[in-house]
Image (cartoon, rainbow, N blue to C red):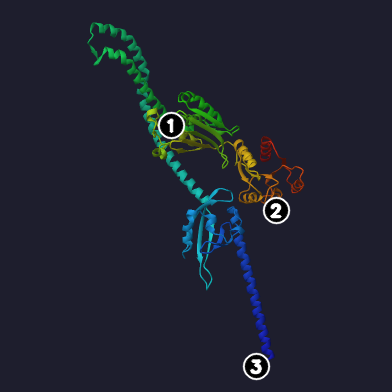
Amino acid sequence: MMIKTSDETEDLKKLLKQEKCKSRQLKKALRESEEKYREIFEIITDIHFSASPEGKIIDISPSVVNSFPYRREDLIGKSLPDFFLKSSERSAFLSQLGDDSRIADFEFQSEGSDRRIRHYRISASHKPRRGRQKIRVTGLIRDVTAQKESEAELEKSRAQLNQAQKMEALGTLVAGVAHEINNPINLIIYNTPLLQKVWSDLLPVLKAHVDETPHRKYGGLTADFLEQNLLQLIGDIDMAAGRVAKIVTDLKNFARLSGAAEKQPVSVNEAVSNAMRLVHTTVRNAGVTIETQLTEDLPLISGNLQNIEQIVVNILINAVQAIDHSQGRIRIETGIRPADGRLHLSIADNGKGVDPVLIERLFDPFVTDKQTRGGTGLGLSVSYNLVKSHGGDINFESNPGKGTIFHIDFPTLVTGKPAKILIVDDDPVIRRMLSRALTSRCAYLVDEAANGIEACLKLGACRPDLLVLDIFMPDMDGVEVCRALKKNPALAEVNVIVTTGHPQHPKLAEVNRLGFKNIRSKPYNVSELIEFIDNILTA
C-alpha cells in the first residue's frame, strides 16, 4: 500500500477544491441560464410550448392566458390539438407532428380570451434525439389576427377602388347617354297629350266622313279600329316614353357626383322616416307591411339628407319588388355597432332573395332580375355610390326563398374614439340589459365578463375606460379585482363604478379604502346609471 506524502495530499486537496469551485460555478451558470430562460419564457407574447410527438403538452408559457380562455396548469399533460384545433384539423396536425420535419405555418382559428374568433399560426420543430432521450416538439403559437384583418382590409380596399373606378367610368358614359336621350324623349312626352286632344277633336269629323265613305281606310286601318284603339295606342306611347324618362332619371342619379353634394349633420332616423313617406303608396299597393325599430338618441352623421333618403327609398323599392307573396314584410332597424361605434342601418325583407347568379354583381349598374316589374338595375348601384360618398359601407345577406337583408354602416360625428366599457357581473341578464342599453343609446364599445378572473384577463388584453363592477361574484369577487387594479400601474387610473345588492356589506368599506368611491346600489335605474357613466367619461 502506497502512502501519499504530505505534498501529494495537499495537491489532491487543492485539486478537489478547484473541482468543487468549478462545480459551484457551473451550477450557478446553469441556474442563471434557467432563470434567464424562464424570464424569457414568461414575458414573450407569443406562446411557447413543448409537446410530445403525440401532441401532449409538456410545458407552455404563461402568456397562454392572454390569448386563450385557459389556465396554464390546466393545459399541462393535455392534448394540444384538443384544446386549440377543430376536430377536422387535428389529424392533419398530428400527422405533421409525427414527421421529423418542420411544421411551417399551420394556421387555425379559435376563440380567444376576449371571446372573439381569432387567427393563429403554429410553427414547430422536433428537438434532436440525444441518447435515449425522447423526441420532443417545440414551437410557437402566434396570434396573427391583426395581420389577417389587415390583409382582408387591403383586399376590401382594392375591391372598393376597382368598383369606384368602374363606377366613375360608367358615370361619365351614362351621363352622356342620358343627355342624348333626354331631348327626344321630352318631345314625345310633351306631344302625346296634344295628340290625344287632336284626336278627340277629329273623331266627330271622322265619324261624319265615314257615313259618306264607309269602306275607306286611314293608314291601312279602318275607322272603327281607330275609334276603338287610337287613344289606347297614344296612351301606350306615352307610357313607354315615361318608362324611358324614368331610365334617364336613374341614369342621371347614377352619374351624379354624390360626393359633391353639400353635407351637414344628418339624422339617419329622420331620413328613414322621410323615405317611408315617399314610398308609402307603393308599399301599400303591394300589400307589404313595414316594421321599424329605430334606436333613439343616435349620433348624427355628416351627409346629405336627400342622398340618405334616396339610399333608403331605392332599397325599399327593391325589397317590395322582391316580394311575390301576400305576407310581405320589411323590417328597418337602426343602432350603434359595438365593435367600432359606427351607425348601423339594416333593411330586411321576406321576399324571394337574390338570384345566386347575380350575387357577385348586385351593385353593378343594369344588373336586375326585375325587368318585368319596371326595374332598371340602377337603384342599388346609385345606393352603393351614395353610401361610399358618405364614408360608409354597404353589403347584404340573402337566402333564396326567405329574403334579403341589407347592412349599411356610416361613421358618426362623435369626436374621438368611442369609450370602452367592461361590464363585470355574474348575472347574464344584467350584463345583457346594460350592454344593450349602452350600445343602442350611446356610442360606446361594450364588452362583458362573467367573473373577476375573466375581467382581469380582459383588462390585461385591452384596457377599458370604465369598469362597471359587481362586488359579489364566484371564483374572484369585485374586491379582489379592485386590489388587482391598484397593484397594476397601467390600470390604476381606470374609472370604476361598483354595483352591489348589499350596500351595507363590510366589503364596501375595503372598496372605499382602496379609493373606489363610485358605488351604486342594485336594482339601479338604467337611464340614471347611463347618465352617471356619461358624466364620468366626459369629465
Q: CA distance from mark 3 to mark 2?
A: 69 Å
* Above/below status of 218 relative to 382: above
> Mark 1: which amino acid?
Ala
| Location of the N terminus (image quadrant) | bottom right
Mark 2 and mark 1: Cα distance apart in space: 60 Å
Q: Amino acid at mark 2?
A: Lys
Instruction: Say whether disc 3 or disc 2 marks the residue closer to the N-terminus.
Output: 3
Q: Position of residue 427 (x, y in %)?
A: 65, 43
The residue that mark 2 highlights is 487
Q: Which numbered marker is on residue 2?
A: 3
> Where on the picture, by quarter, is residue 419?
top right
Determine the secondary structure under disc 3: loop
Mark 3 belongs to which amino acid? Met
Q: Which residue is mark 1?
A: 322
The residue at the point 56 percent across, 42 percent down is: 340
User: Element type at marker 2?
Assistant: helix
Q: Earlier in the sequence, mark 3 or mark 1?
A: 3
- Number of other residues with Cα within 10 Å of mark 2, as a class: few under 14, some 14 to 19, many 20 or more: few
Residue 479 shown left or right of residue 34 in the figure: right
Circle 3 residues within 10 Å: few <14, some 14–19, many ≥20: few
Residue 464 can be seen, yes or no: yes
At 63% across and 71% down in the image, what residue appears?
A: 29
Observer-nearest residue: 252 or 101?
101
**Quarter of the image containing the C terminus?**
top right
Residue 385 horizontal/vertical position (percent): 46, 35
